[in-house]
Amino acid sequence: MRYLKLKGLIVALLLSSALLSAQSAQSEFPRKDWMLLDSKTDKIAGMSVVKGYALLKKRKPVKVIVAVIDSGVDYLHEDLKDVMWVNPGEVANNGKDDDGNGYVDDINGWNFIGGADGRNVEHDNLELTRLYRELGKKFEGKNGPFSDPEENKQFNLYKNVKLAFEEKVNEVKSTMKIYEPIYNDVKAVKEAIKSRFGMDNATSAELGNLKVDSKDSLSSQIATAQLYLGLGFANDLNELYTAIQGAYDYFNGQLEYNYNTKYDPRDIVGDNYFNSNEKNYGNNDVKGPDASHGTHVAGIIAAKRGNSIGIDGIADNVQIMSIRVVPDGDERDKDVANGIRYAVDNGAKIINMSFGKAWVKDKKVVDEAVKYAESKGVLLIHAAGNENTNIDQVTHYPCKAMEDGSMASNWLEIGAMGYDLDIKEGEEEKAPAKPKYKMIVGDFSNYGIKYVDVFAPGVEIYSSTPENHYDFFDGTSMAAPATSGVAAVIMSYFPNLTVQQVREILIKSSMKYPKYKIKKPGSKDEMVLLTDLSASGGVVNMYNAIKLASKYK
């Protein structure tokens, strides 16, 4: 699952799909810490975190380990280095498996997509591509039906995979045909104003003031740049170029890596990929080549509170365990299962999983790991996905529904919401005469009254990024760790609660807005209730959760 980032990729995605209405690269937002605020006192749809801590002054917390299964975490980040989990049984960098857990020098966690030689998988295929490649070896050029029922099942899967794969590849190629000339024009303008006019950057007005002959190719290229600047996607040429280059690289990368059947980086890992029960592979590089996503997730949960640096995370007594399984592409089921088991075996009580995919190879091995976590009392919190899709109808993997028909009792599926309530004090549970309600659910967010449990902040979330930086990201990838942070606070201050009780508390205590209509994700103007989008019809709220937890035995 790719995280959404308004400055750059999303702007470019909007351009590529020809949705050329004037929209700013980043809308106005109230405060960088909006997710910590309260709907009543602050008039912002945060999770009442600041208000919630006021209820905990007389309680003594215990440390809770939260595993972040993701792209990697910058464990030296100024706002995270003090909250990283350190394996108490391991001696750093001595080349030995001191604690005998099967992983050498796993100080802050483990990397299941790295090799013993120190190399790392950065890019990978989508699961759809891997399935197309493997099934194609068996069924390309053949026609069914076959006498073996299992072979017929695999053949039918191959036909669906082939159709979906070819459709996606054609879609990306068509997008690149739109993008390439725009990218080339803007790049040419950027280079030309530097070489001809000595300008490092320019606004639309400044470009219009340049004296360029109408017969010069630069004239039409400047017109293209001005067109897109005029739509409000960017303030100047450099910002526009960055946005378009980001999208160009993204789609080009899809063709080069994600949908390229000839690209398979698994030899870097060095495992027997087709042995799903294999566990002891990888390396201890828990940051990896691109830890932006995982570092942002970790900061939401636990960036050190009260240190006057960067941001305040949600939970104040947390240790972050970094487990790397997510490349640029789809995670592999074997790695996900091993990541879950590693987290459980090394003391994590919560596992945040801000990733997902549309196709699955080995659901059984992941189901078994989920059940293992369930047996050990570990809560799994998963992002619902960013395709504005009803996942009751279109499965988003991994999921809480097991192949045997059961539902995992230790699983929370999270949708993403925004901050703008536009409600008056005392109206939270009432329908206003004339609602001025703005969309509070992220337009990208997946939903489903059966499989999405609750929503949490996931729009314009400010958090840590590698090398001591910070940025705004969008996505259910941000909503999941917001929920993990609140869950960690409940487990820390109410350590005797079971994982099922914590899950129940987060759902029951969620803030309800039963009579307020909101825009359905992905629709033009269809207005629905929160109860039409999730099982709880609510938004995670720490203040309410603490009050409810104090009543549990």
Image (cartoon, rainbow, N blue to C red):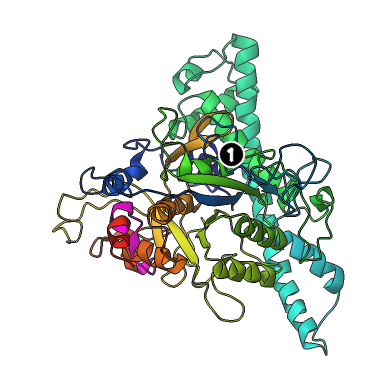
Whether 231 is drawn above or below 201: the answer is below
483 inside magenta stretch: no
Tell me, yes or no, if residue 231 can be seen here: yes
The answer to whether residue 212 is above or below residue 143 is above
The span picked out in magenta is 532-545
Q: Give the class, few, some or many, for how many residues have Cα within 10 Å of label 1's Cα (few <14, many ≥20).
A: many
Element under label 1?
helix
Is residue 535 in the magenta section? yes
Residue at screen point 82% across, 86% down: 146
**What amino acid is labelled 1 in the image?**
Ser
Residue sitting at x 69%, y 48%: 110
Q: Which residue is mark 1?
A: 292
Rendered-image quadrant of the C terminus: bottom left
Give percent across and percent down for residue 366: 65, 67
Residue 399 appears in the picture as rendered: no
Query: To which quarter of the image does residue 517 belong?
Result: bottom left
Q: Horizontal placement of 551 versus 104: left or right? A: left
State the image quarter where residue 41 is shown. Answer: top left
**Relative image position of residue 415 (x, y in whole percent):** 44, 58
Residue ID at (58%, 27%): 220
Q: Nearer the viewer, residue 341 or 190?
A: 341
Residue 363 % position (x, y) = 66, 70
Q: Is residue 69 left or right of residue 498?
A: right
